[in-house]
Every structure is written in structure tokens, then in C-alpha cells.
Image: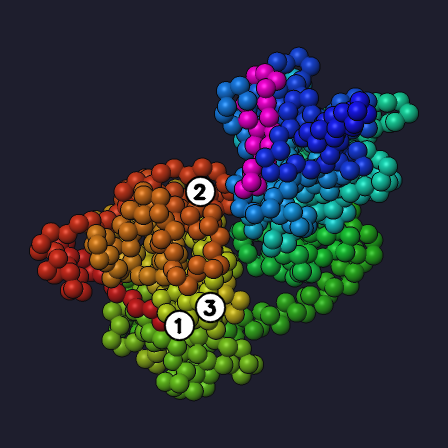
Amino acid sequence: MIKFIFFFLVLIYASRPGSHATDTISPNQIVTYNETIVSSLENFELGFFNPANSTNHYVGMWYKKISTRTIVWVANRNAPLTDASGELTLTPEGVLIIRDATKGNVVWSSSTTSVTNPVCKLLETGNFIIYDGISQENPIWQSFDYMTDTLLPGMKQGVDLVTGIDRRLTSWKSDDDPGSGEFSYWVDPRGYPQLILTQGRDIKFRGGPWNGRGLSGISFLRPNRFYNFTFVVNPREIYYKFSLVDPSAITRLVVEPSGRIQRWLWIDSEQEWYLYLTTANDQCDRYALCGPYGSCNIDKSPVCECLKGFEPASPNEWIVADWSQGCRRTTPLDCGQGEGFNKYSNIKLPDTRWSWFNETMSLLECEKMCKSNCSCNAYTASNISGGNGCILWFGGLTDIRTMAENGDFLYIRFPRSQIDSIENNQSSRTRRRVRVIVPITCGVLVMLLSILLYYRFNRKKQQQQQEGNKNKFGQDPENRNGDEDLELPLFGLCTIHKATNNFSMKNKLGEGGFGPVYKGVLEDGKEIAVKRLAKTSTQGLGEFKNEVISISKLQHRNLVKLLGCCIEEDEVLLIYEYMPNKSLDSFIFDKNRCELLDWPARYEIIIGIARGLLYLHQDSRLRIIHRDLKVSNILLDKDLNPKISDFGTARTFGGNQIEANTHRVVGTYGYMAPEYAGNGIFSIKSDVYSFGVIVLEIVCGEKNRGFVHKEHYNNLIGHAWGLHNEGRSLQLVAKCLNESINVSQVLRSIHIGLLCVQRHPEDRPTMTSVIVMFGSEVPLPSPKEPGFYVGEPTQDTRQSSSSNEIHSNNKLSITMLNGR
């Protein structure tokens, strides 16, 4: 009888949850303070703990077989229990919760799930997962997605672009407080992805981008016998990960409360952790210590120096070791002929947040792309092992240092006068090659001079013809560039006639305010688009010349390329590169073709337009205000890359000029900013307003002009603003996009669009700010009331709502340019 009772008690004890080592939690099973979960091979253990000098209690995970308890994950790090009455349980719906049994409240829970047969399991990798009870391959929740301060083998540190989960390491507040500290170590996906350490919003250390062998800013990250590492960039995810080479090794990467990033290795014979590697070893590891175009060299004193070809931007501060202003070019760039690149070797690549990359291009293609864009300051291969891939930098080059070993190379743009004079240690063979080339070059120059004289002779004859045309077409009184020469190739009229089949109607692509546009094919097979000034057009030689001067010297991948012009007999023609996909409005406003542009394509188009507009406003030779930005003036190439076109009404600003007034308002109703349409005041902010309208139209698939909501009679802008204020912005999205949208991108795009169309120009962001807002997750300000917000109509306006007539109290001249 006694044996039977003893056996019965053993069975009861064994059936109690947590009373024996188990690696799973079933629904409604409770794990209390003195119970733990242990992985099957006893590598990891999970349960309640409290730090040595703290009265707070947490659920955490530690190594089971290590004598020194080392916490590698904490569930409720920011919601501690104040006593030992905590309970860990799994709900029948598959949600893991920590409950304060004394107070009866839930202090922490995993994300909401929906599963019929949930199981929670601690794996040998240290991953604590919830799955459907059948397959562990795709858990519905996992601790690896919510890491604390420790990176374990197999963990992905980075961003899941599908779910939006950002896996980053965040330090403890102190050795006794596992709450989220000041320091975070994470993969920044802006530009070419890179690892950075931040303290709040400030960057403290930059590990740099992956270069095919390691991280550009961490020279000691190299193959070893304990672990290997990889960096993955694809459309679904971006992450850094390390894996064990020796399965018996125990190693972890930790962000300490002090902000130091340290790799620890467990030495079993010594029964202690050994510091294997640490970052931020010296002064040069401080982010941007030497400022833009400055380079840090720890082996020199002082450590900061300007790159060759640059000088201190603030010499007085530089002398007293204040290097924050960095360096500036000794000879500014002018985007002229002959600009090239000088190579810098064994350096840490600059900050890549504002870079562009393509991992399939060759280095030669990369150089050509950078050279064709005046905003591109430098380039390099994204994979130094294979010498392929491409990274382009726009703006200042920041956080460069000289590396003792395993450094990268970088090609920096310079004007012709500085090419090769900077790197003057060329080999004697190269010098001999130059001496051989010189006589040949002289001969070529003589030939070119002869051709130039012949060209000028013929051009003078054509200018005489043009003088007669000027009297016919007149000059734009607002065009300040009226006396500039047209530095652009001239096409003969017979060439254009042949290319367009005598302006055949079969070749006609569309028509705008300037006139019809025709497709043409030159004798060499090159496809062109020919814009022909119509005899009935309200525009003339002034607009023609304005467009030529505005765009002929602009080079940007998001601006349409002007190939040449023709003024002969009675014809005034502009010749452009041919855009096979025509204009953006032919897609987004067409009920049949709108599905051809899914959300990822539309989002890239929005970003491309923003980059092109930023170039016009800030990075081009002169600040250019487009004044007629709209979807029909956004052309799409064969790869659906957007290109801003139609610069006939553009104006150029010089120096620090930011706005101007005009007596002649030109543009398109529905895209014009209030201050421009009402008072003739235009600036870069009037273009920003037009951009905001375009963003909303791309998202909605409806035209702002002509859109009247049946319930509140708002136009598209007012409708978008109302939905945003009610938290229902997703209702604005075009139905054809429902299956392809990225919710966070869509909501952010609508928000930025509304910021751009605010009533007052000073409230609107600049395009620089717009690019930053699209490229980061910084919180956005709330938009104020937009311009041209319609609202509830009066009885009179309701009766005339069907009219399309445009009224102008100030007798404004509004040029209505229809889409091609």
C-alpha cells in the first residue's frame, strides 16, 4: 500500500507544469518563479530571474551549461515585476504572456496571433518560438525577432522588408537594469545598407557597408576558426548574421551599457568569458570625427587630414583640432567636360545613407553612371572581392578613415585640372605613354579645330535665319537668359522629316501646350521624340529658347535628355530621347493600364521624381523652378524610370534667390500652389506643392482636378486630408493596388504628400527634407490645412459644380497643358 501511494505521488508530481525539465509550454500551462524551460540538449534555459543588485524580476534566457549565469534575452525588459509572483503562460490563441499573479494584470505579452493548436518551444539555438504545433519552420512568433543586447549564432540582425520587423541590438540601461538603454546597434537600410551604433538619434560608430569580404569599417572582422559571417541584401530582407564553424564554441556579440560592441568567447578550461574582439578601439572610430571630405589616420598626429584635392573648410578651427566642419574642394566642380576620378585606396568607405547601389553592374558601368550625373561625387564596387557591383555617393563624403589593412578603394570626382595631378606617383611607364600620346593629341586637336571653324561658319548662317524667326515669335520678357548661346547640337530639317516620315500621324505620340510630339528614328537606328511648335500655340521662340537653355546642361537620370534642336524655315523643333512608356498619366489614370504599375513601381517613381526635383532645386548649375510639374510631364523609360520633362515655362534663379514674382502665370490648374495662382509668386516651394499633388494622384489613381467627393464635395487634396485626420488614409489607395501595397510606405507617402500641399509655402518641406523623410523612419510633423481645400459647398456652388469653366478674378493667364 505504501509503495502504491509513493508511486501515485510521483505521478502527480511529474504531471505538474514545470516540475521537470521540458522545452515546451502548452496552452494554459503556467511556469512560475521556481520553474524553468530547458532546451532539449540543455544548451539554453529560460525562466524568472532578478539581477544581482536589483529587486525587480524578469523572464529571461541564459546558457544552461555555463557556471556563470549570462543572460542573453529578456522578455519584459521594460516592464519588470516587483516581486516573485510572476507567471508565464501561453494562451489558447497562441499569445505568450507574463502575469503579475498578485495584482492579476498582464505586464508583458508577445504579438497577437491566431492559431488553433499553439505550442511554445525553446530551441537549441536559443530561439524561443510559438508555432502551430505541426511545423517549426515558420514560427508565428520568435524571440530572435525581438533581440535585446545579445546577438547569438543564427540570429538575423537587420530588417525584414516584408513584415517591417527591425531586429536591432539595444544595450541594457546598466549591469543591473536590463531595460532598453541609450545605445542601439542596427542595420541602416537607407542607401547601401550598413551597420551603425547610435546613442539616441546620434551616430556614435559606423561599422560600414558590406564589401564582399567584411564590413568596411571593421578591419579585424575576418575569417577565423570559431565562426563565419555573412551579409544579405535582397528584396525581402537585409541582415547581418554569424554562424559557428566549431559547434562546440560558445560566442556572443553584446552591446554593453557603455556603448562598446564586444564579442565574447567562453573558455571552458578557465570557466570564464574571454574578450575576443571589441569595436571603437581608437579615436578614429568616432563617427565623422574629421567632417566631410576629411580622413582620420590613427598613425598620424593630428589624426585628421583633408583628402588630397581638398582643404580645411574652417582653417582657424582646424588648427585648434576642431575638425567638425571638415574640408572643401580646392577647385569646385562645374560638371564640365573632362571631369574624371582619382582613386583612393585602403580607406573605410564613407557613410552610405545617401548613396545609391546596384549589385549587378560592372565597375566600368558604375563609373559611366556616376560621370553622367552631376550630383554624383564618388563611386566604388560594392563587392571588392569580385570587383563588381556599384555604389554611388551624392553629397559630402563623411566618416572616412585610413585602414591599416583590408581597406576599400574609392573613386572621387574631380575637375579636369586636378585629374592625375593629385595622384602624382604614377609609374614611369605611364609617363612614357603620355609622351607618346601628346603628338597624336596635337594632331587630333588640329582636326577638331578645323571642324569647329567649319561648324561656326555654318552656325553663323543659321543664326541669320534665326534672327528672322525671332521677329515672328518674339522674346519672353521674363527670360533672363535671352542672350545666351544655344550650346546644343543642331539637327537639319531634312533629317527630322526623314526620321518622322514627314511628321506622319502614325508617328504622333501626343500633344502639349508647345505642340504635337512625334516619334522618329534616325539613320543610325536611334529612337527620338520630336516636339514641334504648333502654329496655333500660345508659346513661341521664348519658351523654346528657355527650354533649351534650362535643360541642355542638366544631367540627371530623372530628367529627360534633350538631344538637340532645329530652327529652319518655319519649323521650331526640340529633339529628345524617346520614352517608350510615354507619360505617367497614361498609366495611373487609365482603368485598364493602371494595374501595370503596382505599388513598388509607383513608389520608385515617386522617389525618382523627388530626386530629379532636388537636383533642379539644389544640385544643378542654377536653381531651376519648373513651374509646370504634373503627371503628364513625367515620362517613363523602358524600365519605368521617371524623367521630368517640359521646361518651356521653367525659370532659373541665381545665388541665394529663393522666390520671384511674375505678371504672367503659367502652369496647369490643379497643380499650381495658391500663392502662385493667386499672386504670381513662385519659388521652390511652388514646385514642392505640385510634387505633393503628384504623390497623392499616384497613390489614389485619380486626378486632383475634376475630383469631387459625392459626400463632402472636397477635391482630392481635401479628401486626402480628411481621411488622414480620421486615421483612414488607406481608403485613398487605388483599388488596383490593394494586393501590392506596402502599408507603411503608402501611409508615409500620403503623409509626405499632405506636408507638401500645405497652404503656406513656409510650412512645406524642401525637397532635401522630402528625400530624408522618404529614406528614413523619422517621425513626421502633422500636416496643416492644405491649399485649395474646397470643403462643404454653398447652394450656389452646388448648382454650378458640373461646370468645368475656370474663373480668374485677377485675369490670370493660365496655360492649360494637356497630357501627351
Quadrant of the image occupied by residue 435:
bottom right
Quadrant in the picture for the N terminus: top right
Tell which of 316 and 573 is nearer to you.
Answer: 573
Q: Nearer the viewer, mark 3 or mark 2?
A: 3
Q: Nearer the viewer, mark 1 or mark 2?
A: 1
Q: What residue is drawn where x is 32% and y is 50%?
A: 720
Q: What residue is drawn where x is 38% and y is 37%?
A: 781
Examine the structure image and report whether residue 94 is included in the region drawn in magenta: yes
Image label count = 3
Q: Residue furthest right?
A: 269
Query: Nearer the N terminus, badge 1 or badge 2?
Result: 1
Relative vertical location of residue 269 with respect to residue 781 in this rendering, above or below: above
Quadrant of the image occupied by residue 572:
bottom left
Q: What residue is drawn where x is 44% and y is 67%?
A: 595
Residue pointed to by mark 2: 769
Residue 813 visible to the viewer: yes
- The amino acid type of the residue labelled 3 equals Leu
Residue 685 visible to the viewer: no
- The amino acid type of the residue labelled 2 equals Ser
Relative vertical location of residue 766 with respect to residue 485 in this rendering, above or below: above
- Provide residue 421's location: percent of width, then percent of height: 69, 48
Examine the structure image and report whether residue 791 is included in the region drawn in magenta: no
Disc marking residue 596: 3
**Label 1: element kind:** loop
**Label 3: element kind:** helix
- Give the class, few, some or many, for how many residues have Cα within 10 Å of label 1's Cα (few <14, many ≥20): few
- Provide residue 580's location: percent of width, then percent of height: 48, 73
Residue pointed to by mark 1: 592
**What segment carries the magenta color?**
82-100
